[in-house]
Amino acid sequence: MLKSFVSWLDDYLAGEDSTAIVKSIIGIMSFAALLGVILGNIAIKLGALIVVIFLILAVMLLLLTDRRRINNEADMHRQLLTRYCDFIWEESTKPAAIVKRWKQVVSVAPNGDVKESINLHIVVLHDELYFMRLWSSPAWDQPPRFRHRVKVKVRSLSISGGRGPRWAVTSSWTHRGKLHLFAHLHSPVPKGAELQIEIIRDWPGKCLPLIRRSPDEFTFRFSPAMTIAEAFFVVILPKGEDAYYEPVGFHEPCKDYSVARSSNGDDRVEIALRIKDLPPDCRIGMRLELK
């Protein structure tokens, strides 16, 4: 009987917010208090209250156990989805898409939190494109407690710059702290079609090494499934900060890659990486250290 009641309560609470849980507990306790008033015996009141408290604790423990089971199953499904999407993405002998232009702006907060804006202009090379794979990771061994706070939104952009509805996004984490993200299109896009995509990513603590005056790396590397014709990677430092910088994966002067420093209109220093025709599986980027 208790198991059936817990199952019903779990289904009910799944469609409600936290206020419903509070109201339910207050309702049960109010019923116990009313029962004590009707019976008029202090011992009965106290006994009823104790029974209700233990009942609430038992139900909460059962619900927490069930939630843990559901979360474990969801993690397993995410890992399986990642495995199969990786296989589909990599199995083709030709690229799924070519990125005509990639512009990524990374704004670093004084506490090391990062807000990233990525704009892509791609051309579909497969017969139909159903999803896109992107992965990212901090340049340090970030503790797992940061992961659930990483937020990602993906949406299409019109030619005029208008934003479309958000895409469905599935993600999973590797044991090394790499975020595998799959952005699923609302409908398959045919070969030759062009897409403009916006990705907004909030990543707490991603640049903590940089803020703590340690060298931090910002690099690109793509598999043969998606080639890059042109890319811009801009890191905006916290106000009042400046940085030493050097290239990673190439030596200047280089006609296809460059790193430069400038200041924006908000009087914040920007370090910009420019890339042209990035080869597959080639790691190119820059290394920064705050002065």
Image (tube, grey):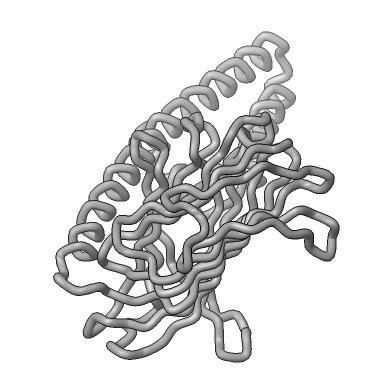
Question: Which residue is at a point 40% across and 78% down the rendered structure image?
Answer: 186
Quick one: 34 or 185, which is closer to the camera? 185
Quick one: 231 or 153, which is closer to the camera? 231
Question: Which residue is at a point 70% across and 30% down the rendered structure image?
Answer: 34
Q: On the image, which quarter does residue 111 sit in? A: top right
Residue 140 image position (x, y, % from top left): 49, 34
Question: Which residue is at a point 54% across and 61% down the rendered structure image?
Answer: 258
Residue 249 image position (x, y, % from top left): 42, 50
Quadrant showing the C terminus: top right
Q: How many marks?
A: 0
Residue 197 image position (x, y, % from top left): 50, 75
Question: Which residue is at a point 44% across and 34% down the rendered structure image?
Answer: 63
Q: Is residue 242 left or right of residue 275?
A: right
Q: Farthest residue toward the top?
A: 43
Quick one: 73 or 94, which is closer to the camera? 94
Is residue 86 at least partly visible in the picture? yes
Q: Is residue 74 left or right of residue 169?
A: left
